[in-house]
Image: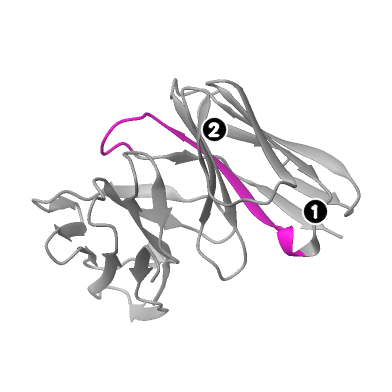
């Protein structure tokens, strides 16, 4: 079983749509969780950290369910500029050993 | 200069060549990493250095040899690579602490011919 698994995508949505990405992690000892964004042929960049209480940053909301080992990302009012691959990340075997999921590709169209 | 910088950005090498990838971070971090990203595959963690000490070698073949002379610099020495080693090699840095993210360099796109 992969350590971090994500929806394979791609998700093709119109502008203004709400889209949700799901992710599961296998290591119950994981302590740090993130969502990264990666544009085509670029490096991954942090989108947001994920906390047990849930957190929101503008149109983006991240949730963590430790009991189910499940992480989610909700994007509201999608913009064309949101088109990218979204990477779910969990730590493994220590704070800073970050394991990335394969990513979910999002394409927002006019 | 700020952030994480990698050189070269692109590299083409033959299977008998020896080359090195360089990474430098200007963020004052104490951990550095090498990741490999192949087409249609997730980012694979290769090596982790905490406070200049290697703490993780994720079953990487010996033809990849990392070196971390100080907390700001990280190298990946390459020798006798195979065509399947062609990929984007990403360097990252972070603090060794809970809930701290990793910052990535722009990567070196390596092609082995």
Is the N terminus of chain B in the top left, top right, bottom left or bottom right quadrant?
Answer: top right
* SS for callout 2: strand
The answer to whether residue B86 is above or below residue A32 is below
Measured from the top left, where is residue B78 in percent x and y?
A: 77, 43
Q: Nearer the viewer, mark 1 or mark 2?
A: 1
Residue A65 magenta: no
Dot 1 or dot 2: first in sequence order is 2
Which image quarter: residue A26?
bottom left
Magenta highlight range: B84-100
Numbered circle sitting on residue B81: 1
Is the C terminus of chain B in the top left, top right, bottom left or bottom right quadrant?
Answer: bottom right
Q: Is residue A42 left or right of residue B83?
A: left
Measured from the top left, where is residue B70 in percent x and y?
A: 57, 18
Q: Is residue B83 left or right of residue B58?
A: right
Chain that bears disc 2: B
Residue B98 magenta: yes
Q: Are marks 1 and 2 in contact (CB under 8 Å)?
A: no
Which residue is at the front of the view, B86 or B50? B50
Chain that bears disc 1: B
């Amino acid at each position: 079983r992969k350590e971090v698994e994500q929806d394979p995508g791609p998700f093709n949505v119109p502008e203004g749509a709400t889209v949700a990405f799901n992710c599961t992690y296998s290591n119950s000892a994981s302590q740090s969780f993130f969502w990264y964004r990666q544009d085509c042929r670029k490096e991954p960049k942090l989108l947001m950290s994920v906390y047990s209480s849930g957190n929101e940053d503008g149109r983006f909301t991240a949730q963590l369910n430790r009991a189910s080992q499940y992480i989610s990302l909700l994007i509201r009012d999608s913009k064309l500029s949101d088109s990218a691959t979204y990477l779910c990340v969990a730590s493994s075997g220590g704070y800073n050993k970050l394991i990335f999921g394969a990513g979910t590709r999002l394409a927002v169209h006019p | 200069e700020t952030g994480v910088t990698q050189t070269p950005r692109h590299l083409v090498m033959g299977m008998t060549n020896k080359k090195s990838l360089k990474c430098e971070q200007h963020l004052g971090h104490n951990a550095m990493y090498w990741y490999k990203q192949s087409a249609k595959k997730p980012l694979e963690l290769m090596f982790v250095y905490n406070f200049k000490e290697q703490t993780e070698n994720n079953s990487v073949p010996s033809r990849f040899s990392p070196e971390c002379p100080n907390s700001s610099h990280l190298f990946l020495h390459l020798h006798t690579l195979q065509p399947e080693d062609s990929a984007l090699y990403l360097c990252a840095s972070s603090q060794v602490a809970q809930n701290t993210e990793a910052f990535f360099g722009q990567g070196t796109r390596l092609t082995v011919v």
